Amino acid sequence: MSNRVRIEPTLFQDLDENLNEIGEVKYGFRMFDDEGQSYSTVRSTKEKMENALNEYEGERYEQWIGLAMSHYNKEIEAMFDVVRDQANGIYVGENWYTWEQIKKTLESD
């Protein structure tokens, strides 16, 4: 069974110990698979998040992949290595994108 990697667009909101919202909402992503996880709070407003995504060419899923690739750490690098090694697809949000759809984006790094 292959290891499915997922990039999940995420809205981050800090809470106090009583679960009251504190601080500002932040936009970013979580990336995870069966072996690891990572996250990145990329921007402080929806407009800034849109601008960050628009720095990358292609369809929206390609922009999310590009953004995740630009926030490399050991965990993210390992997840992308699994995708490349297995020539496997990736989830972006709830949608599955095949290796054929994403390989050009992954090979451009």
Image (cartoon, helix red, strand yellow):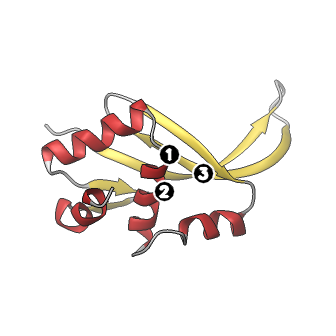
Q: Position of residue 58 (x, y in %)?
A: 39, 75
Q: Residues within 10 Å of mark 2 (few under 14, many from 20)?
A: many
Residue at horizontal 18 percent and vertical 51 percent from the top = 88
Determine crowd level at label 1: few under 14, some 14-19, many 20+ residues with C-alpha closer than 10 A.
Answer: few
How far separated are the C-alphas under marks 3 and 2? 9 Å
Q: Which residue is mark 1?
A: 71
Q: Residue at x 35, y 38 (%)?
A: 77
Give x and y (percent) for residue 33: 34, 37
Task: Estimate the x, y position of residue 35 in percent, counting from the top left.
Answer: 32, 28
For the residues carrying marks 3 and 2, which lies nearer the camera in this image? Answer: 2
Q: Secondary structure at mark 1?
A: loop
The residue tagged 3 is 28
Residue 76, above or below 94 = above
What residue is drawn where x is 14% and y is 44%? 86
Instruction: Give the quadrant of the C terminus.
Output: bottom left
Q: Is 87 in front, or is 11?
A: 87
User: Which element type, helix, strand or loop, lies under badge 3?
Assistant: strand
Q: Residue at x 17, y 66 (%)?
A: 100
Labelled disc at residue 4: none
Where does label 2 land, which residue?
67
